Each structure stands twice: as C-alpha cells, then as structure tokens.
Image (spheres, grey):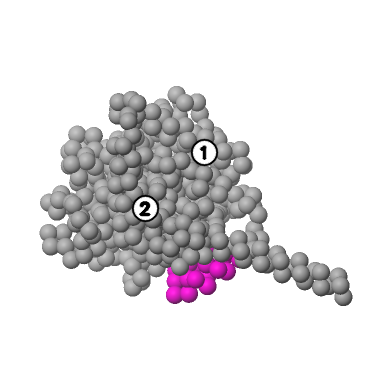
Amino acid sequence: MSVACGFECVVVLGCMRWVWKRCTYIGNDDSATWPPATYDEFEPIPRLCRTILAVYEDDLHNPKFPPEGGYRLNPNWVVKRVAYRETLGNAPPYLIYLDHEHHEIVVAIRGLNLVKESDYKVLMDNKLGKQMFDGGYVHHGLLKAAIWMLNKESETLKRLWVENGKSYRMIFVGHSLGSGVASLLTIIVANHGDRLGGIPRSLLRCYAFAPARCMSLNLAVKYADVIHSVVLQDDFLPRTPTPLEDIFKSVFCLPCLLFLVCLRDTFIPEGRKLRDPRRLYAPGRMYHVVERRFCRCGRFPPDVRTAIPVDGRFEHIVLSCNATSDHGIIWIQRESEKALARLKEATSAEAPTAPPPVQKIERQHTLEKEHKKALERAVTLNIPHAVPTDTDEELSVHKEEESVRGVTETASLIEDASTSTSHSTDARTNWNDVVEILFAQDETGKLTLNKEASCSTE
C-alpha cells in the first residue's frame, strides 16, 4: 500500500512539475541567448510589412484600412495586382511593386483567408514526406503555388530586373500561408537565377512573416543567407510541428490542438525530432521580436534578436492567450515599427568607432560566419541531408555563381521541348521542368535528390 502511495506521489509531482514548466514557458525563452539585431538588417522589415498589408487594399490611391502613418507606397509604382479571381485558387493574391526609392522589385503575398476554400486546398495538398525537393522535404501545396506564380510572373520579373539595369534587389515577402510560398519561390530562383535574366543570389531576399513550417531543417539552414523569418513573441505557427493541413482543419478549436501537441511533444526526444528528415521547420534566419516578460502585464518596448538556430528552433509550444494574436500581420507591423525606432535610437546614441560602411562590411562578415557555423552545426548533429560547408573563399564563390550555373546542361533541352508551344505554355513548361531537376523518383516510388542538380547546387 505504501509503495503504491509513493508511486502516486511521484506521478503527481511529475505532472505538477510538467504543468509548471509548460505554463511558465514564454516566447521570450526561445531567443534568450540570441544576439540583438542591428538597425541596418532590420530596416526593411516594417516597410515590407506595409507592402503585404497593401495587398488587402483594392485601390491604394484611396485606401480603406491604412496602418498608422499610411502605407508610404507610391501607387504609381504598383506593376501588377493579382486577386483571387485571377489566381483561380492556385495561389494567394499578390502584388508586384517596383520600389525605385530602395531599388527593389517586391513580390508581396497575402496570408490565409479563412473564408476562401482555395486557400485551404493549397494547405491540404500535402502529406508528411510527400514532396522531396533540393535534397530535403517541402510542403507540396506551397511548392505548387510557387511554381504557378513563376509560370505566370517570371517574364514580368525578368523584364523589370533587366529594364532597371540588373541592379535592383528582388524581394519575395509573404505572411502566414504567403510566407511559405515566398520561401519556396526564393529557393527556386536562387537555384535557377539564369531563368530570370541571370540574377545573382546576392540580390535575392525573402522575408517570411509569421512563417509557416514549409521545409526540412537542412533546407532551412542552407538558405538562411537569403531567407529571413520574422516571429512576433508567442506566435503559434512557427512553433507548431503539426502539419499545416491539420492545424487549419482544427482552426476553430486551436487552443485544444496546441495543448495536445504540447503534451505529445513532451515525450518525443529532441534527437528523434532532429533525425526525422520529413519534419518541417520555419525557414532561414530567425528574427524574434520580443515585447512581453514573465509575470508582467502589457507590452513593453520590443527587442529584436536574431540567429540561425539548428537545435531548439522554436520547438516549444507557448501556452499563451497571445499565441493567435501575435500571428496577425497588423500586430507584426506595429511592433516592428516600434522595434525599428528603438534600434535607430540606440544606433544614434552610440558613438561610432568606425565609419558606417566599415561597420556594414563587418556585420556582413559576421552574418556569413554565423551561416557557416549553422551549416557545420547541422552536420555535427547528423541532420539528414545536411550540406557540409566549404572554405570561406569557396563559399562566397559558390553563392555568387550558384544561380548562373544551376541548369546549364538542361536549359537547352527545355527550350527545344518548348519551341513548338505558345509563349504562355513556354513559361509553364519551363518552370515545371526546371523544378523537377531538383528532385526525382526512383522505380520503387521513393523520392531522391537528382544527382546532376545536387552537383550544381552544393
């Protein structure tokens, strides 16, 4: 009897300890050891948030729901706006904006529309391990949406880049559902920049706001130099390992789902999670905007931390009443504006020890070293399909030349196959074939990395 009572006490104490740890775990803990971001690297984020919000407007000349301070966009620089009636359910609505002030070509993609069946179809078009791509796994429906957008807009993007002296940066931005599409768009273009006029990898950027888990860990780390994810405090989506299609099936009982996922993940060892090649993660370098503290009410002046985490990459569900509100693009825009103002004040208050150009060069070198260390860390942890790093010289040359050499052996075959079709069919056939270069299926039906593509991208 005494033994049974003792066992019950141990179980009760264990459960109480687990409840205490889970209830006291806050979003601030995920990035507690990360270094702060700098003003220069965070500066585009509030501006690009406003560009995503502009996708929701029917007419930027007469906006109905402008954020505080307005969109600060020139409506005459909007090249194209594509709504649901034009995407035909293949992708979320998006906007192409030619920003002459900052020398950028911006493709902004909106987030999930809860009343649009077509958005759910994109999310549901996936199963765990269904789609292998570029040596890892990605979300099948989001990849199809990215390919559809390239089929439709590649000629427009190529023309804009060439007409503006081949010097403008190409920025893909998205929120929630759109973040996954933007991230996979970036990976495709980074490998096949020659299809867009030869744009180098150094001029490509992706900003994923409230990012969806859309790619395996090796890809998330590999493309951290071009993909940047922005997470506001307790946002549930980057932390939820449950597949997207299951999350939004339970969107109206989301708190219940988050609690059950939290309970389940308690019994899954960290090493087992890392060794699962099909497990999807939020992409790229992470920027965590933190504006709440433990046992403190209200929002505090936000801080921004950044890193390329490999293990401990937003793996813990935060049981918070703000888990869903922190997912909203409007809150991300507001808090990022405040964070940028704080970074600007801190930068101006500090006495510069070196000229600004020198500081920017040093920071760029630091970011490159962080990326290399993350790649090495992924190999050390035996992450499936992790790519070993090259030397510093080889790594810089690889990043500059990767896009222009990606599909040189197959480009002529694609062009020959499409000469007898119309211009629109050309684009569709080219991008479908180009993407298929990065993955293949053997006789047993198992998806494997195409060796020729592997040689050109690694």
Side (left or right) of 373 relative to 302:
right
Amino acid under disc 2 = Pro
Q: Name the residue under label 1.
A: 374
The nearer-to-camera label among 1 and 2 is 2
Q: In which quarter of the image is residue 140?
A: bottom left
The answer to whether any part of residue 8 appears in the image is: yes
Judged left or right of residue 21, residue 305 is: left
Relative horizontal placement of residue 227, taking residue 384 as reference (left or right) = left
Answer with mark 1 or mark 2, whichever residue precedes in sequence: 2
Which amino acid type corresponds to the residue marked 1 in the rendered image? Ala
Does residue 397 lie above or below 303 as drawn?
Answer: above
Give percent across and percent down for residue 113.
33, 67
Quadrant housing residue 284: top left
The span picked out in magenta is: 241-265
Residue 75, horizontal then vertical, whole percent:
14, 53
Cβ atoms at labels 1 and 2 below 8 Å apart: no
Does the magenta segment cover residue 262?
yes
- Locate the N terminus and report the quarter of the image it occupies: bottom right
Q: Element at badge 1?
A: helix
Q: Residue at x 43, y 45 (%)?
A: 305
Residue 314 image offset from top left, x and y in percent: 51, 53
Residue drawn at (39%, 65%) of the image: 325
376 vs 33, nearest the viewer: 33
Neighbor class of circle 1 (other Cα within 10 Å; few <14, some 14-19, many 20+) is: many
Q: Mark 2 falls on what kind of element?
A: loop
What residue is pinned by disc 2? 301
Q: Depth check: 68 or 274 in front? A: 68
- Quarter of the image where one finds residue 360: top left
Q: Distance between the residues labelled 1 and 2?
A: 29 Å
Q: Which one is in front, 6 or 319? A: 6
